Each structure stands twice: as C-alpha cells, then as structure tokens.
Amino acid sequence: MMTTTTDQTLPTGNRLTVCFAHVAYQLASRFAARQNDIRHFQVWTLDELVNRLPEADVLVVSGLWRNFLLDHAPRLRLIQSIGAGVDQFPHDELRARGIRLASARGVNRNAVAEHAMAMVLALARHLHTGRDNQRAHRWRGMISDLNQREDELGGKTMLIVGMGGIGARLAQLAKAFDMRVLATKRNLASGPAPADALFPPDQLPALLPQADFVVLTCPLTPETELLINAEALAAMKPSAYLINMARGRVVDEPALLAALREGRIAGAGLDIFWDEPLPADSPFWDLEQALITPHTAGETRRYEENVIDILLENVARLQRGETVLHNQIV
C-alpha cells in the first residue's frame, strides 16, 4: 500500500500540480484562462485518473472518485470536491493520511434552488404532462375534476427539509410566489432564514401533513439516510408533491415508487437516484406523475468558474500555512 506523509504544506508556483477529474466539465481550460503558473492537467475517465494521479498534489474531483485511488496518490495533499456532497470520500482515511478535503458547498446554490422551484412550477402547472401530450400530438381537453386540474402556488405550503444555503435561497423564491414556507434546520441558532417558521429535524413527522410541496435540500448523513420512508410518505397529503434535490438515499425509492403508483401522493420531481445513471428499465421512467432530470439541478454555465474560485482560495490558504479551509471537511 502506498502511504503519504502527514506534511500538509503545498508547493508553490510551478512546483504545484493540480489534477482536474471530470467526465464533462471544462475545468482545465477555464483554469488556464486565469493565467497563473500552476501546472495542471485534466483527465476524463477513471482509467486516466488512475494512471496520472501519482503526479498530483491537488485533486479536483467528485463523481470519478473511488477509494482505491488513495493507493495511487503518493503526493496528494488536498482534494477539492467539485460538488457540495462529500459522502463518497473516506473522511477518516483522508485524515489518517494527512490529506485535506473541502467541499464546493454554495457553488450551485442559486442553480439548485431555481431547479427546485422549476420542478414545483412544472408540477403545479402540469408542464410535464403537457410535454407528454405534445409529443403524442394530443390536445388535452378542459378538466372538470378540481383535484386533477392545474393549480396556483399562492397560499400553498412548501416544507423545506434542510435550511442551508440552497434551502434559504429556495425559501426566498417560494415567498415571491406568495407561498407559506416551513423548514427544518439542524441549528436553529445559526442565523435568520427566510422562512415563516423553522423547526428542528425531529419535528418533521408533524410538519409533513401540512405541506403541499416537500422539498429535500439536506445533506446525506446517517440521520437523513432513508429519511423519507414509507411512514413519512404516508404522512403527506394525497395532493402533495415530493421534490428531491438532496441525495438519492435520502428517499426510500421502493416506498416512493409504491406511493406514486398507488396515488398516495400527487407526484414527485426527482433529480437524483440511488443508482446513476438511472437504469433504462427503472419503473420511474414510465410514471406520468414523476418529473425526472438527470442530476442536473446544479448545472450552470458558471459552474467551473465557481469551483475554481474555491480551489484557488484553498490552495492559497495551505501555501500560507493556514489550517482552516473554505468549506473544510477534513
């Protein structure tokens, strides 16, 4: 097994090498446009990452990460996650090897909040079924049943599970549509939030029956894994919608599938799943009441620039001998 030194200082200038690892993001080209003298390269596949990781002092990565890569990283001192989620990294092992870890929390705050609000609007206004009808060349008639008709958001209640940066921004957007906003937050004393009322997480069962839209923006932790299970879904109103912008395993997928098939909730907007890409034979694809996007809630044309801003800040801190990182995890 390769081991690393516990020295956490970073080389300066062109003695520092950064590896960008992502299947799509143009990180290296955007980094080069900053015109600094830091050596860098980008890999696009896991095989490339295995081969070139031994060269890197800093790794910028998210979805391509595999824990065995640590044995191919003798120089590694810093992992800068490309995403806000860091549950894929072995925190204790990184700590033992003296490798620092920082998240990109906040990098897609606006994008995810806007995506969640777009899901809410689309489900309320039946845009998802409208697109289905368009594709089928079918002009849907007017609906007599009030329970099946499009709706307005004013006066509806949104429950945001996880009032962090994304949740706070979403609350602002929801308030602009005259919605009532309730939210759960782990630390109620950590500052004001733009919600009508804040509650500790253990109050979620009492809040679910009040919500017309339940929006998940919480991190995946032992406390939130399978948080929305069969019991939680049963507590929701039959007219309510679930929007998942968090992590796939915050939701019990078999329980959600059953609730949607049996009409026990009105629908769901889902950007993340247990298995990604979502398998072609997944039953979620064929549910009319489900609106699916391929883990693109955080996508924005400025994403690379936002990640690089955080990366350069953390590199500078470590080069100055500072010990606290921006968005520090390890």
Image (tube, helix red, strand yellow):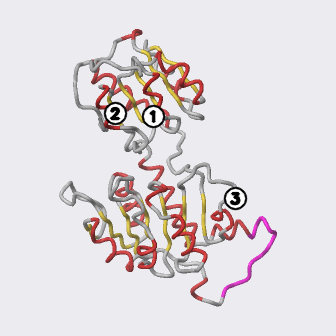
Extreme-front residue of the structure: 1
Whole-Å distance between the Cαs marked 3 and 2?
A: 36 Å
Please name the amino acid that badge 2 sits on. Answer: Glu
Q: What's the mark number on residue 189? A: none
Tell me the mark number nearer the camera, choosing from 3 and 2. Answer: 2
Where 235 sits versus 43, above or below? below
Looking at the image, is mark 1 or mark 3 earlier in the sequence? 1
User: Magenta span: helix, strand or loop, mainly?
Assistant: loop
Q: Which mark is residue 281?
A: 3
Name the residue that disc number 1 marks. Answer: 67
Three-letter amino acid code of the residue under disc 1? Asn
Residue located beneath label 2 in the image: 93
Left or right relative to 217: residue 268: right
Pick the quarter of the image with the N terminus.
Answer: top left
Q: Determine the residue positioned at 74% across, 82% down.
A: 141
- Residue 67 placement: quadrant: top left
Residue under the point 22% across and 27% down: 323
Q: Earlier in the sequence, mark 3 or mark 2?
A: 2
Apparent side of residue 121 relative to residue 312 in the rendered image (left or right):
right
